[in-house]
């Protein structure tokens, strides 16, 4: 019976994958999404794809000039799109900035989804801390998003919305158990990045458990982009301008890399596909490249005990407790 059930589940997932075309998204007219880190990379192309499908997208970033350039690029590249883009300053490493941005979003009205994408991909050589006292990479990639999702939980619940956390295939390569997520000891740039993504994945899965338990009508999903590089991505002034050397190096890796446009496909599907369920993970079909498909987080990241520990750590570091009771009403 167990083997039959497993076979049936595989067929169901395969059918879901076959029915999805990232070039022809569902009509998103009337829906509003917030994307963090929208001025470049995955966040920019996810925003572009959402606008092209008719959505209103709140593009966020910490640099006003780069954010304005990204919005202008969306308008120039999609002159006939039915959706729209607007901008909002948001620095996920700064909890004050997160609170201010969340207050603005609540005032602007409805919200159907959060794409928690912003992050540091190339961490500093030495450990740095934010003004809030948190390790910089952890704060930017995980803690700021935890605080933002909590601050917007009731707004999302009003629309039965969804939050998507940006994971990474690096967590299956280097299986660090984040017992010291702030990396007070044994800091290295690679460890800082992988542990921040491990925390992000664990907290995204724990959020799903807690939302279900509290009967809050919001789903929490994980997505990862595979191996997506700037050098294999279309050049856009002010958004994606890799050097000639960068393009040369990235094209040498062509068999196992893809563009940022394609890397955004699993993120967008995780955000808008009505058949995606809370607690799922989505990534490229060939792990590093390809059409979006259901994936599986590393086993240790799915441990409820680790989820409980890291959730409490996030609450303490951000001084934020999610308003589950208010969101359920």
Image (tube, rainbow, N blue to C red):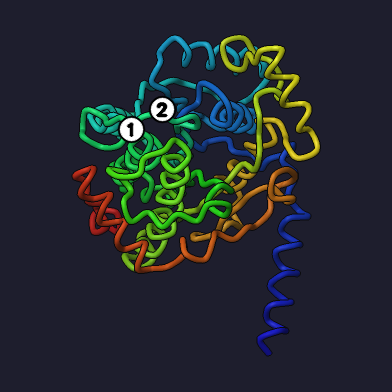
Residue 107 seen by the camera: no
Residue at image coords 74%, 77%: 7
Rendered position, 111 above or below 175: above
What is the x, y in percent for residue 263?
65, 37
Foreground residue among 103 and 54: 103
Residue at image coords 35%, 68%: 305
| Residue that label 1 marks | 127
Distance from Cα at disc 1 to Cα at disc 2: 7 Å
In the structure shown, which secondary structural element does the residue marked by tag 2 occupy? loop
Rendered position, 5 above or below 41: below
Residue 259 position by quadrant: top right
| Residue that label 2 marks | 124
Q: Judge the density around disc 1: few (<14), some (14-19), many (≥20) Cα neighbours within 10 Å.
A: some
Q: Contact, CB < 8 Å: mark 1 with mark 2? A: yes
Residue at image coords 51%, 38%: 31
What is the x, y in percent for residue 284?
69, 47
Residue 167 seen by the camera: yes
What is the x, y in percent for residue 328?
30, 59
The number of numbered discs placed on residues in the rendered structure image is: 2
């Amino acid at each position: 019976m167990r083997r039959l059930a497993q076979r049936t589940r595989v067929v169901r997932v395969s059918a879901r994958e076959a029915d999805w075309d990232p070039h022809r998204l569902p009509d998103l007219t009337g829906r509003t999404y917030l994307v963090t880190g929208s001025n470049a990379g995955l966040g920019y192309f996810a925003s572009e794809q959402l606008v092209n499908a008719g959505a209103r997208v709140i593009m966020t970033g910490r640099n006003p000039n780069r954010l304005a350039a990204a919005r202008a690029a969306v308008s120039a590249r999609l002159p006939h799109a039915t959706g729209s883009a607007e901008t909002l300053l948001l620095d996920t490493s700064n909890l004050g900035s997160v609170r201010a941005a969340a207050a603005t979003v609540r005032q602007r009205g409805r919200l159907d989804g959060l794409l928690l994408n912003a992050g540091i991909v190339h961490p500093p050589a030495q450990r740095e801390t934010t003004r809030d006292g948190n390790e910089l990479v952890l704060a930017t990639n995980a803690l700021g998003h935890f605080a933002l999702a909590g601050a917007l939980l009731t707004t999302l619940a009003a629309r039965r919305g969804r939050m998507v956390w940006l994971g990474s295939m690096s967590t299956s390569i280097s299986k660090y158990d984040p017992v010291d997520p702030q990396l007070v000891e044994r800091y290295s740039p690679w460890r800082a990045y992988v542990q921040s993504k491990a925390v992000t994945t664990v907290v995204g899965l724990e959020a799903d458990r807690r939302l279900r338990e509290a009967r809050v009508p919001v789903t929490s999903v994980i997505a990862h982009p595979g191996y997506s590089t700037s050098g294999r991505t279309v050049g856009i002034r002010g958004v994606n301008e890799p050097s000639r050397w960068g393009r040369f190096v990235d094209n040498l890796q062509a068999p196992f890399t893809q563009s940022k446009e394609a890397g955004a496909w699993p993120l967008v599907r995780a955000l808008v596909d009505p058949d995606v369920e809370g607690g799922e993970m989505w990534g490229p079909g060939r792990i590093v490249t390809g059409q979006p498909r259901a994936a599986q987080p590393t086993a240790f990241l799915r441990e409820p005990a680790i989820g409980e520990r890291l959730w409490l750590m996030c609450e303490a570091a951000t001084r934020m407790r999610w308003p589950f009771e208010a969101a359920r009403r």
